Amino acid sequence: MIGEFLQWFTDPVHWTGQDGIPNRLLEHLGYSVLALVIAAAIGIALGLYVGHTGKGTFMVAGFANALRALPSLGLLFLVTLVLLDALPNTLGQFLPALLVLVILAVPPILTSTYAGVQNVDPAARDAAYGMGMTGREVLVKVEAPCALPLVFSGLRSAMLQIVSTATLAAWVGLGGLGRLLQDGQSVQDYPQMLAGAVLVALLALVMEALLAGVQRFSVPRGLTGRGARRARATTASEVTKPTFSTEPEDEPVAAR
Amino acid sequence: MDWLEVVVLFLQHLWLSVVPLLLGLAVAIPLGWLARRYRRLYAPMLGVTGLAYTIPSLALFVALPVILGTQILSPVNVVVALTIYTLALLVRTVADGLGAVPDDVRQAALAMGYRPLPRFLRVELPVAVPVIGAGLRVAAVSNVSLVTVSALLGVPQLGALFVDGLNRAYLAPLITGIVLCVVLALLLDGLILLGTRALTPWQRERGAT
């Protein structure tokens, strides 16, 4: 089985043309990134709005929970079937699937963005208002940057959902790596299905690692650098220590 | 549409969603305990389960036959794949739930003479039940949705109604399938919620006063 699988994988026929691995991979990646960008624009904007103003909080929780219970495969087939007749052929090929990918990706982004804004240290928010910032400035300069780590964890779970559902979308004509699975199944070509499965899994893992990496770099230094600042503070106290060390009672204070 | 057929699909769906839930919980409890007991294991354990959770369900359904030596149509693949996902969700929940047990509760149990295993089973685990229950609810609802995917490979459950609806361009089976999936998800969600309440009578009393 493994031998057949490797044979399928190394066959140059499977690396060229529309059905080739590079093309299917690019299709999958293209739809996934496009869906993520659209979903991020909607989810982050709504999440920041709800988190900042506190309006529509109930909607966020209800929306996310209701969508979790909906089976994504059923939603994909339903939207495709309903829109198929309403759309011209070229659009009908990919618009329903793209729509479903966006619908599934918005809730995780929305809820985690909202949670990120909610979790901002109230003292930081108060300090920003105290410095004379307007509501919009507080949102852009304080709340949004502080929420960034959680926004990214939302983007990561959204991307997982998208890559996974985009695989299913091959059954409604979207192309992508799911086609290897679908085509393989229709002709009982298990090595081809296995190749598709491995490629999809690899794509998901790579996207996850990539977003995790970007997340690490995007978090504001003020949030991650807490350890560094504390280290600087202790060295500063050590520098000033000699002036106080004449007093014997200083020791317990320094230890604290 | 044959209603008997739909009922059979519903029951098959129920079975495919619940068995992995119970298996995943049974494995997650000792693993979560280990992650708590030996703190160094916590991060790597969550790393490995997180990695498994990253793999899309259809890919896992297709890849498992090679590892398990099963047929591609076998429901065993679905059960094993969903057990892995459930486990990935629950290991963290169990470890965090056990970690949230107040230290004075643990100390009191120790002072009352509980040996480590009874202390875990009769004090720490019950106190962690609300947290574990919350994780179990998420896993149950997500399992119901994930099971449908295996219909693309021909494993019979409610997802078969989706495929049937798409192939015949007929909305009735498709919508029936979706509604029954949501009903099943809400049913399991409600049952776990009730079970959690029944297992934690002290929380109800606190709420009443």
Image (cartoon, helix red, strand yellow):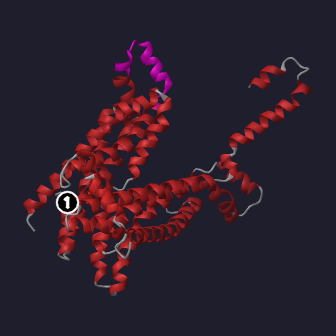
Which residue is the site of mark 1? Answer: B158
Q: Could you say which quadrant of the image residue A173 lies in?
A: bottom left
Task: Decide if residue B58 is in sight here.
Answer: no
Residue B132 place in picture, x, y as percent: 37, 38
Quarter of the figure with residue B146: bottom left
- Direction from residue A1 to residue A206 in the image, left or right: right
Magenta highlight range: B99-119
Residue A97 in sight: yes
Instruction: Please indicate whether residue A212 sits to the left or right of residue B176 in the image.
Output: right
- Badge 1: chain ID: B
Quadrant location, the C terminus of chain B: top left
Q: How many marks?
A: 1
Which kind of residue does numbered mark 1 sit on?
Leu
Residue drawn at the location 69% of the way across and 45% of the way down = A225
In the picture, measured across the screen, residue A185 lies left or right of residue A83, that is left
Residue B113 within the segment the image draws in magenta: yes
In front: B207, or B55? Answer: B55
> In the image shown, does A171 or B67 lie closer to the viewer?
B67
Q: Position of residue A112 (x, y in %)?
A: 51, 55
Q: Assess whether residue A149 is covered by the magenta stretch.
A: no
Determine the main secondary structure of the stretch shown in magenta: helix
x, y percentage for residue A90?
Answer: 36, 85
Q: Position of residue A213 (x, y in %)?
A: 57, 54
- Indicate the quadrant containing the N terminus of chain B: top left, top right, bottom left or bottom right: bottom left
B82 and B94: which one is in front?
B82
